[in-house]
Amino acid sequence: MMQQPVTRTIYSFFGPPGSGKGTLAQKLVTRNNFQMLSTGNLCRQHVAQGTAFGKMLDEYVKQGHLIPDALVTDMVIDWITHQAETDNPIILDGFPRTKGQAELFLAFIKQTSGLHFSVVSFLVPDEEIVQRLSQRIVCSNKACQSSFTASDNLTVCKFCNSELTKRDDDKEHVIRERLVQFPQYAEVLLEYYRTVQQLVEVMDIAGLAPEAVYNHFLTAIGL
Ligand SMILES: [Zn+2]
C-alpha cells in the first residue's frame, strides 16, 4: 500500500499587535497540539544563545538598522525544518509581516512538499486593543514569555513560576503609535496576497472574549 503523504498546515496569524492572536495561539498549543512560533521570541532566543543568526541580528540592531526580510525568513524556515515530523499544525504569530517576507516564504512553501499555507487575518477595533494591552503582563523568563492580563490575578508565571513584568512597549502611547503604523504595512501585504491569489481567512473578533475567539477559530477551520 502506498503511504499517505503527510500534509502539515502552517497558519500565519496576522493582525495588529494586541489583537489577541498570541493568546489564541497559546490555547491551540496547550489544547490542540499546535506548535507556535513568535518571530520576536525566536530573535530574542538566537541573540541570547549567541547563534550565527543571533550575531547577525545583534549587528543590525547595534547599527540601528531594520532586520532584513531575508534574515527573518531564513530563521523561520530554519525553525520549521528543525521541528519533528508530525502533522500538528504550526502557527506563525505575526509572520510574514512584510511583502518581502511573504514572497520569500511562499517560495519556500511552494518548493517544499507536504506543507499547506493558510493566512488568518484578525480584525479588532483599536480601542479594544489599547484597553487589552494596557492590562497585559508578561513572564520575565526569556525562554517562556507567556502573557497574562491583570485580571488573571497572578503573582508569578503559571507555567514557569518566574516573575511577571510589564513591557515598556505596552504603555498607551507606544501602543497607539504601533496601531497607526500597522495599516501601512498590512495593506501592502494583503494586496500582495491578493495578487498571488493566496487565500486570507478574515476573522472579525471585535468584542469577543478569548474563549469565544478560540471557539470561533476552531469552527472556522472545521475542528
Ligand atoms: Zn513563564
Image (spheres, rainbow, N blue to C red):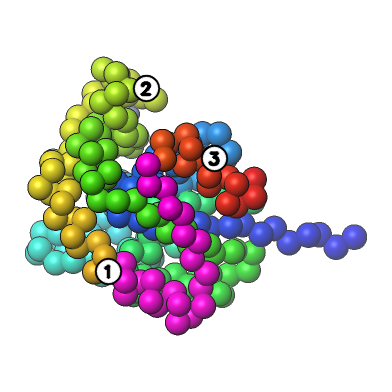
Q: Nearer the viewer, residue 14 or 69?
A: 14
**Residue lying furthest bottom in this view?**
195
Magenta run includes residue 201: yes
Query: Which mark sits nearer the N-terminus, 2 or 1?
Result: 2
- Which residue is labeled 3 in the image? 215
> Could you say whether the residue bearing mark 1 is in a helix, strand or loop?
helix
* Residue 38 visible (yes or no): no
Q: Is residue 118 left or right of residue 52?
A: right
- Which residue is labeled 2 in the image? 158
Q: Position of residue 173 (x, y in %)?
A: 10, 47
Are discs 2 and 1 less than 8 Å apart at CB? no
Q: Is mark 2 within 8 Å of ligand 1?
A: yes
Q: Position of residue 124 (x, y in %)?
A: 34, 51
> Could you say whether the residue bearing mark 3 is in a helix, strand or loop?
helix
Quarter residue 149 falls in: top left
> Could you say whether the residue bearing mark 2 is in a helix, strand or loop?
loop
Circle 3 packing at 10 Å, graded few (<14), some (14-19), many (20+), is few
- Which residue is labeled 1 in the image? 185
